Amino acid sequence: MNEPTRYVESGDAKIFMRQDGEGPPLVLTHGLGDDHAFWDPCIEFLSKHHTIIRWDVRGFGQSSKPPGPYDLTMYAADLRAVLDALEVERVHLAGLSMGGVIAQKFLLESPERLKSTTLVSTSSEISEKATANWRRLADRVESRGFGRIDASRSFAEGFAKAHPEIVDAAGAQTASNDPAGYAAGARAVSDYHLTADLAAVRTPTLIIQGLADQHTPPGGSVKLSRAIPRSRLLMIPEAGHSLPVEQPVLFTSALLAFTGAIEALE
């Protein structure tokens, strides 16, 4: 695992990945509209204790953007291809929002590859109303593009007011995406129902949720924590959907305490 960046072949896509640091491998998976750089505020701390593997989900960042449709099984296969290419057998896996849904799918399909899972600002199922909303968004972006995006809802209200430059950068990041790739990603996570299946999970799981999350209400994390038998739920006051950006020290401290405890028991 010496190359800092590389591309990995997975089906009809080339998946971009980056490595930083040393130690037990920790994979970070970004959310819809972002790429591996979303995790930049956390890398200095995390890379002191882990080999950090970040990847751009197909359709986003520097990964290729083949025509859709995409689905969760495809995303999980892409992640397996990354791990296989790196010859990594078992990892700690963390994912935020869409990345958290991908992490759940990987957890269900390949539990033998995981030491632990950390799910951030995500849920285990989606309502019919939300499904319709996501599909309308996908159709609109695909046909009209993005336009100017106000990303303030991705953060806690107080943080957004105090850091308009970060909000503007988040909006610009979303608007820089390929519309077709973004739409395919939005459709891929527009309809999932994993709650019942998660009852069989035995992998240690940490769930981190901001109480001021305007995109994924905290109730979804409560349901998620009840579904996974060996999970722990950490609720963060005054934190929104982009919790690792808003509170990187708190987030990395919680994650490292969790993965460190798992490593101590290995």
Image (cartoon, grey):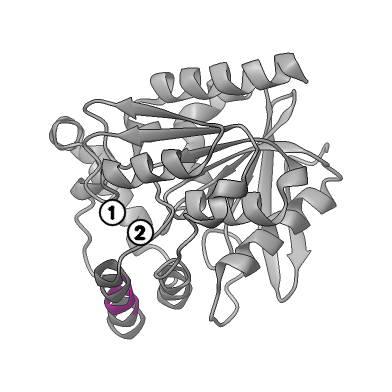
Please tell me in which quadrant of the rendered image residue 205 appears: top right
Q: Which residue is mark 1?
A: 171
The residue that appears at 70% across and 66% down in the rendered structure is 14
Say what secondary structure mark 2 lies in.
Answer: helix
Q: Position of residue 23 (x, y in %)?
A: 75, 23
Residue 25 visible in the displayed image: yes
Q: Amino acid at mark 2?
A: Thr
Q: Which residues are magenta?
A: 134-138
User: Which residue is at the front of the view, 220 or 86?
Assistant: 220
Label 2 neighbour load within 10 Å: few <14, some 14-19, many 20+: many
Q: Position of residue 212 (x, y in %)?
A: 21, 36
User: Which residue is at the front of the view, 167 or 242?
Assistant: 242
Label 1 neighbour load within 10 Å: few <14, some 14-19, many 20+: many
Q: Residue furthest right?
A: 87
Q: Amino acid at mark 1?
A: Gly
Are discs 1 and 2 less than 8 Å apart at CB? yes
